[in-house]
Image (cartoon, rainbow, N blue to C red):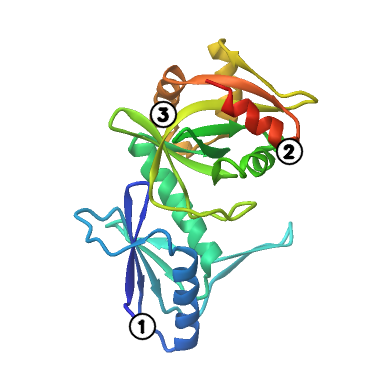
């Protein structure tokens, strides 16, 4: 097996290396789990530019920090070198790697016209329709109801990035409520819907920009140190898209019919 893999996430290039360790069984287990989870993001294409190199290294011991007052314990996750390379240990599994990638990805996006959005999305008319709302609003439910006719793209976190003057949705490797087929493809964003459970299905457009700002920014996963870079981008995103409130029931056929007749 190779000792490294190349993965592409939202046009960013990652290299994941597996250094030698006397714990060969743990190394093989970690590598096998990695290949299984990231299979749709692994590429054999050579990168002209590498955005991040993450290395699994051998560490005999793992530091453990504790907050005795709260009876909480914290373990080592990763360290970052001056050149930007990331080191983590074989004691950390796939969930830890996903957290590392999420931290790195948020930083890369904030510097490259992008952000993470807490939403669900479906491919409708070959474009991405985004569904936004707080906890319990129905983000996972809505894509389940539409799945018979429209491909789910995410039900938890979407990567939004401006490429060639258009905002696109990229799928992420992060674990979601339901696992749908993923790829490195990008999907041009068409419309954004704020979800509202109802006893009827209908859509109304939102025209008040301050209302959109108030509702929309609650769902963006900001990185605090780079928030100044992202706020202008969010305003640009809002000014270039139409926003709607979608009142919906759990009647799948009626909801699909609504979108088929919706222009």
Q: Residue at x 42, y 79 (%)?
A: 58
Instruction: Please tell me whether mark 2 or mark 3 is closer to you in this view.
Output: 2
Q: Are marks 3 and 1 in contact (CB under 8 Å)?
A: no
Image vertical order of residue 211 relative to residue 66, above or below: above
Image vertical order of residue 5 relative to residue 195, above or below: below
Residue placed furthest toward the left: 48
Q: Nearer the viewer, residue 129 or 170?
A: 129
Q: Marks 2 and 3, Cα distance to the nearest angstrom?
A: 30 Å
Q: Are marks 2 and 3 in contact (CB under 8 Å)?
A: no
Q: Secondary structure at mark 1?
A: loop
Marks 3 and 1, the one that precedes in the sequence: 1
Q: Residue at x 65, y 51 (%)?
A: 177
Marks 2 and 3, the one that precedes in the sequence: 2
When asked about the image quadrant of residue 79, the answer is: bottom left
Q: Position of residue 47 (x, y in %)?
A: 23, 57
For mark 2, what is the residue?
Answer: 136
């Amino acid at each position: 097996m190779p000792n490294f893999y190349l993965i592409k996430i939202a046009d960013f290039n990652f290299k994941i290396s597996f250094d030698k360790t006397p714990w060969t069984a743990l190394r093989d287990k970690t590598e096998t789990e990695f290949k299984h989870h990231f299979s749709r993001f692994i590429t054999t294409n050579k990168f002209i530019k590498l955005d991040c190199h993450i290395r699994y290294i051998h560490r005999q011991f793992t530091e453990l920090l504790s907050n005795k007052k709260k009876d909480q314990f914290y373990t080592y996750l990763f360290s970052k070198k001056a050149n930007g390379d990331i080191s983590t240990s074989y004691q950390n599994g796939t969930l830890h790697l996903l957290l590392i990638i999420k931290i790195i990805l948020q930083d890369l996006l904030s510097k490259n016209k992008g952000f993470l959005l807490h939403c669900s999305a479906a491919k409708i008319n070959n474009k991405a329709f985004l569904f936004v709302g707080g906890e319990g609003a129905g983000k996972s439910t809505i894509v389940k109801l539409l799945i018979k006719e429209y491909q789910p793209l995410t039900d938890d976190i979407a990567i939004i990035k401006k490429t060639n003057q258009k905002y696109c949705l990229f799928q992420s490797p992060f674990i979601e409520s339901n696992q749908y087929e993923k790829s490195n493809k990008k999907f041009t964003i068409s419309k954004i819907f704020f979800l509202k459970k109802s006893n009827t299905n209908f859509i109304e457009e939102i025209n008040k920009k301050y209302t959109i700002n108030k509702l929309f920014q609650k769902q963006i996963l900001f990185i605090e140190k780079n928030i100044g870079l992202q706020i202008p981008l969010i305003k640009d995103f809002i000014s270039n898209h139409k926003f709607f409130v979608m009142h919906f029931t759990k009647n799948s056929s009626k909801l699909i019919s609504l979108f088929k007749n919706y222009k």
